[in-house]
Image (spheres, rainbow, N blue to C red):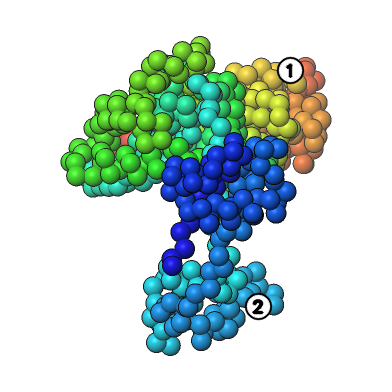
Amino acid sequence: MAYREVAMWEILSILERVGRGESQAAIQRATGTARKTIRRYVALARDLGWSPGEAGPTEELARGVAERCRPARDREPGEVEALLLPHRDRITEWLTPKPGEKRGLRLTKVHQLLERQGVRVAYSSLHRFAVEHCGFADRRRITVRMADSEPGEAAEIDFGRLGLIPHPPSGGRKTAWALIVTLLYSRHQYAHVSHSQTAQDVITGLEDAWYAFGGVVRRVVLDNLTPAVKKADRYDPIFQQTMEEYARYRGFILDAALPSHPTGKPQVERGVSYLRDSLFRGEEWRDLAHLQSGCTAWCLQIAGTRIHGTTRKRPLAVFDNEERSALLPLTAERYDPPRWAECKVHPDHHITVEKASYSVPTAFIGKRVSVRVDQSLVRIYHAGQQIKLHAKQPPGGRSTDHDDYPKELTPYTTRDPERIIRQARRHGPHIGRFTEELLSGPFPWAKLRQAQALLRLGDKYGWERVNGACGRALAFELVQVRRVENILRQDLEQLDVFSTPEARTPVVPIESRFQRPANSFAHSPSTGGEA
């Protein structure tokens, strides 16, 4: 006779009737159970310490009776099991890790090896055999449901590839990426599309989502995106500085999912494939703006009005009725995403960021600085302290604060001839007049280097000697710094060029002597003279 599995509830009902004093015949008529079986249940219950009439039977008692009634399941091996039993030891060897290894062969590989030996069975049958006979553990993870989030508490975000769309600026096609933002409580979502996955794209997508939702959540769970997470770690991830600054600006906290652990953000994990299959595929998209308008409408009209598979509610309705009012308000202006960079200050006092140059004080030459660039300003930091602020320049532009240079180089860098002349006059009248003559003309900047060289001679020879040398050079109309330096080297500035007119030795002109008559040098010699 075939064995029929008896539920614990059937045994409990019979024991309860016995405990109330009903006869076995009455119990048989009510339950359909033979009196022999009823007597067996009562005997097993007595063996477990139960006596009719003293106390009512419990579920634990009925479960114990059911276990003792269950016969041993000795059976003959099935066809597939009989086929695999001769290979049991070999399969066990394949599945057992070798010394120094963490695990043995995968069961899929064992399946292939058996097929090569002519043993062809279904993979599910092999899996069942390995678990029962070879000690193969079922490695499927045991999962638990997380507690439901409160309204407005959290959102999950994830990037995913949609596909190629036309790119009018280049005339070709370019990959479109979607940033999905899913609210955990209502399952309402927003999709932002872009051609890249930069930190600016993440922030722009979140900003669009907050304005679409009308508020901000308190926590954002994100994948370990390179633009957002600098170092992925299970316990202490390091976020990019731009993302941390944005989180503080909007008032939410960042919560990175575990590395290589897609179940860490289950609500958004299939959002990209759902968007791709439901909206993107099978449509003709003109450009990114056309796709974005389609995504916005899809989130409201399709994804927002469907019956969600888990909550069995319409996400948009739950959001409007329960979650919208729980979001943090948008109290600040739209965020301007900055870009951060690490730069080294060049010897010319400048750094280069986004193909533009910005000056830094002399004290920081050769040091590494942090640079924050937004739409209008460039902030330069060293050791956490802001050391310079510049207006944003276009590529190829330069922003120079001449106060960053040493004071002695400022006139040259500012190309201010008048400033150099004033500085020269302070060291002597002849130096000032020489400098004025030197920098005269329509292009004084061409001789700024000579003027700087002249002022450096004072440090080498002394200002009194330089002043005398400049006076002597002016007397002979030698307005060249090289000639002034030659005068200093030969000590010619000590001559009496500047003595008083009374003491000055008179200059006696030398009589001209020529072998030819004077009229020979005229431009139009007279015809009546000597031939």
- The residue lying toward the viewer, choosing from 156 and 317, is 317
Q: Quadrant of the N terminus?
A: bottom left
Residue visible at 58% across and 42% down in the picture: 18
Compared across the picture, whether 162 is left or right of 262 comes to: left
Compared across the picture, whether 152 is left or right of 472 comes to: left
Mark 1 and mark 2 lie on one chain; the one further toward the N terminus is 2
- The kind of residue on which mark 1 rests is Arg
Q: Mark 1 and mark 2: span between their CA atoms? A: 89 Å
Where is residue 45 shown, x and y percent of the image?
Answer: 65, 50
Q: Identify the image quadrant of residue 366.
A: top right
Q: Identify the image quadrant of residue 103.
A: bottom right
- The residue lying toward the viewer, choosing from 493 and 327, is 327
- The kind of residue on which mark 2 rests is Lys
In the rendered view, tell whether residue 211 sits above or below residue 116: above
In the rendered view, tell whether residue 9 sits above or below residue 251: below
Q: Dot 2 corresponds to which residue? A: 98
Residue 49 appearing in the image: yes
The disc placed on residue 426 is: 1
Residue visible at 21% across and 39% down in the picture: 285
Where is residue 408 shown, x and y percent of the image?
Answer: 71, 27
**Secondary structure category for the residue under label 2:** loop
In the rendered view, tell whether residue 260 sits above or below residue 53: below
- The residue lying toward the viewer, choosing from 429 and 3, is 3
Where is residue 420 shown, x and y percent of the image?
Answer: 64, 22
**Secondary structure category for the residue under label 1:** loop
Is label 1 or label 2 in front?
Answer: 2
